[in-house]
Amino acid sequence: MSIDIILQGLSGLFWIITYILIIKKSVKDKTYGMPFLAMCLNLSWEFVFAFIYKSDIFHQIVCFIWFILDLIIACTFFKYGYKDFKKKYSLSKISFFVLIVFTLISSFVFMILAPLDFSILFDGDILQAAGFIAYFQNLLMSILFVLMFLERRNLKGQSIFIAIFKWLGTLSVSIMSLSGMVSSNPTELFVIFLIQFFDILYIYLLLKFCRHK
């Protein structure tokens, strides 16, 4: 078995563990454990690359598993998110659901259109463009997790293990780009560096909070 297959398999496994941990912590703490925009982008990316822009059966299965788990995460957001959004933004319940539906639809449209445009950078390879988009998505997610902790200043919906497995999930495939196993452009490598920075920062902030708790 080649090293790239092992790294891709580890990435899939680590993200599955991350999603399961987020679900368990969300239910336990009665709050959502994934930032709203990250959840919408995740759902749309996984659906699009599981059912629309298909690759090999391995990636389809992994994307499908991620999609199912993210649906469960979305359910926890629907169940617990309104309380926080009402407190922070004074939204009515109707406004809350309109915001969710609009953001989800926009995310799906973006994920359908973007690979066609970004594939120009990769000689028309839509699936390689999918990885490029996923890195930008991961960077946004990493920043949003840091902001979520700084805003909450507690471990509700969050844990050290979520932070670690989330970091490992992206690091596994990032090694392929950083080592030259797959071709990457300078922008992609810079985004990967930023993801590592914010993921390690997130782990550091949670560890520091736990030590002083």
Image: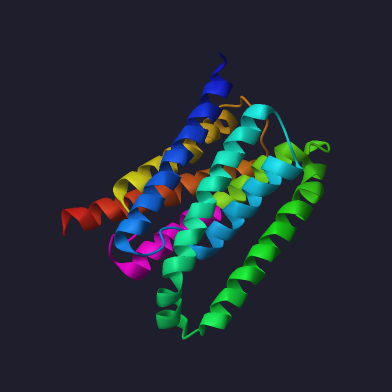
The magenta stretch is 139-157
Q: Does residue 119 sit above or below 183 in this rendering?
A: below
* Nearest to the observer: residue 123 or residue 42: 42
Residue at x 45%, y 77% (from the top left corner):
85
Image quadrant holding the N terminus, namely top right
Q: Quadrant of residue 182?
A: top right
- Percent across and percent down for residue 104 are 64, 63
Q: Which residue is drawn at the image coordinates 63% and 69% (left, top)?
A: 101
Q: How many marks?
A: 0
Q: What x and y, as percent, mark residue 14? A: 44, 36
Residue appearing at x 54%, y 33% in the figure: 173
- In the displayed structure, does residue 160 sit left or right of residue 170? left
Q: Main secondary structure of the magenta part?
A: helix
Left or right of 55 in this view: 34: left
Measuring from the top left, give residue 136's x and y in whole percent.
Answer: 60, 51
Is 156 placed above or below 190 here?
below
Q: Is residue 201 at least partly visible in the picture?
A: no
**Residue 148 location, x and y as percent?**
40, 64
Q: Where the C terminus falls, by quadrant?
A: bottom left
* Nearer the observer, 27 or 108: 27
Considering every residue shown, the one lying at the far top of the view is: 1
**Is residue 49 shown in magenta?**
no
Q: Is residue 151 magenta?
A: yes
Q: Where is 26 relative to 97, above or below?
A: above
Res 53 quadrant in image: top right
Question: Residue at horizontal 30%, vertical 55%?
Answer: 205
| Horizontal relation, residue 102 to residue 125: left or right | left
Colour convention: rainbow
